Amino acid sequence: MPVTRHTKVLIIGSGPAGYTAAVYATRAMLKPILVQGIEPGGQLTTTTEVENWPGDSEVQGPELMLRMEAHAKAMGTEIIGDIITQLNLDQSPFVAKGDSGTVYSADAVILATGARAKWLGLPSEEKFKGFGVSACATCDGFFYRGQEIVVVGGGNTAVEEALFLTKFASKVTLVHRRDELRAEKILQDRLFKHPKIETMWYNELAEVIGADAPLGVEAARVKNVTTGKITEIACKGVFIAIGHAPATELVKDVLEMHNGGYVKVKAGSTRTSVPGIFAAGDLTDHIYRQAVTSAGMGCMAALDAEKFLAEQE
């Protein structure tokens, strides 16, 4: 028989939104259970230097998330290393099923599942995933010491990945389909000044070229979007850094969405289209997508859940 756990507030996800919600929900004496999910700590665990977290002029992303987890535990939050695979919102209490077999029931749910890396969808990209194609420089950059690398993208993610990879690579080529970057100006300035980085404007990745035995990347074939010219860039690694998509698999057919799949919340709150279900962080935020705004929404979600539960009583 599966074990069933009941809690007033179930928090699904463990990034800044989830851990902050846990701190506030615990302080409200709601005794929340937080289920960490597939990537404990969220996207910040795959980031290096974080320079825009208040109180830290610079902090490593993984370290920051360990501190948040420790804070939530110190307050009294029960943190469980499980993955929620099903969520039933048709009944009250709400019921979630974990990959471990545990069933969680809750009077209120805070969704903080964040976002995951986007991929281009190329067959060759899929073929070489894990064998030269990656979406996480901090995870895999170490394997490319002294090698040439290609980074695809033009936002903060792409520029941060390119800068980080210069620690290992002999050369980094940033491929972007426009003629200007969307990244923050301070990051752009660092990128343009870096001697190891070259930028290819008006180009997009057309194909990843590599060997089959053993499987490995040898080059990136890029296409100029204005002229159609094909260029082959010799490299051992291709990093896809085109942003992230909200992780809404649990609720995509249940909750109201907007802006391409983000969970819609009522203005000035974290309330979703189902009473008792609250959403915070990158799952809902298609505009700011910052750790500090996610944490703020986590606070809001816990306070909204506390108010909801008080009204039910």
Image (cartoon, grey):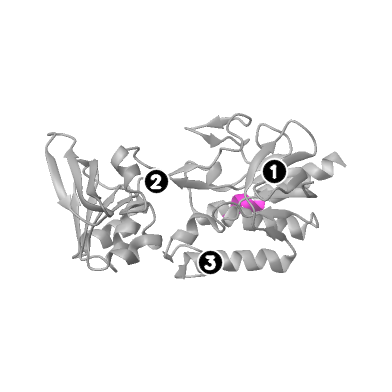
Q: Position of residue 265 (x, y in %)?
A: 61, 37
Q: Secondary structure at mark 3?
A: helix
From the viewer's perspective, is residue 61 above or below residue 227? below
Instruction: State the residue at coordinates (28%, 64%).
Output: 144
The label on residue 97 is: 1
Mark 2 and mark 3: span between their CA atoms?
21 Å
Q: Nearer the viewer, residue 8 or 212?
A: 212
Amino acid residing under circle 3 = Leu
- Above or below 92: residue 181: below
Asked if residue 43 shows in the view, the reply is: yes
Mark 2 touches mark 1? (CB < 8 Å): no
Where residue 140 sits: x, y (%)? 37, 61
Magenta range: 295-299
Q: Is residue 180 left or right of residue 155?
A: left
- Badge 3 is on which residue? 64
Q: Which residue position holds label 2?
A: 243
